[in-house]
């Protein structure tokens, strides 16, 4: 009986630990020149997880004049 309770507690602990793990990636902004395709500027790399990561990955590119900035996550 005690063995079964112990196994159950360990199983619940492991499930909770694995279920709480968030999907994380390192992201940075990249600005390119639309005429040449060359990278003009890259932002600082920062780790994003969960909803913040979804927001960065789904943010559309922004174009101002001849420059386009987008998020790159790896």
Image (cartoon, grey):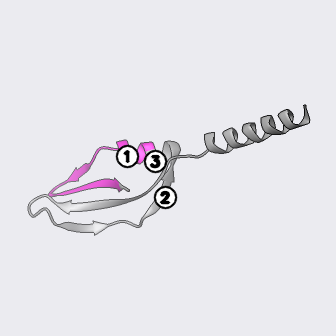
| Picture quadrant of residue 36 | bottom left
- Label 3 and label 2: CA atoms lie apart by 8 Å
Q: Label 2's element?
A: strand
In space, the residues marked 2 and 1 are separated at their CA atoms by: 12 Å
- Provide the residue designation for mark 3: 53
Q: Residue 26's spot in the image, x, y percent?
A: 43, 59
Q: Is residue 11 left or right of residue 31?
A: right
- Residue at figure coordinates x 13%, y 62% from the top left: 37
Quadrant of the rendering where the N terminus is positioned: top right
Q: Is residue 50 left or right of residue 4?
A: left
How far across and how far down the image is residue 64, in percent?
Answer: 21, 54
Q: Which residue is mark 2?
A: 47
Q: Earlier in the sequence, mark 2 or mark 1?
A: 2
- What is the magenta range? 54-72
Across and down, in percent, residue 7 comes to 79, 38
Category of crowding for the residue at label 1, using alpha-carbon neighbours closer than 10 angstroms: few (below 14), some (14–19), many (at least 20): some
**Vertical side of 3 occupied by 70: above or below:** below
Residue at horizontal 74%, vertical 37%?
12
- SS type, badge 3: helix
Q: Is residue 40 above or below residue 52?
A: below
Contact flag, marks 1 and 3 (Cβ < 8 Å): yes
């Amino acid at each position: 009986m005690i063995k079964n309770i112990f196994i159950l507690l360990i199983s619940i602990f492991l499930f909770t630990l694995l279920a709480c793990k968030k999907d994380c990636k390192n992201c940075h902004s990249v600005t390119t020149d639309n005429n040449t395709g060359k990278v003009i500027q890259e932002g600082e790399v920062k780790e994003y997880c969960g909803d913040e990561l979804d927001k960065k990955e789904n943010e559309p590119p922004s174009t101002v004049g001849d420059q386009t900035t987008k998020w790159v996550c790896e």
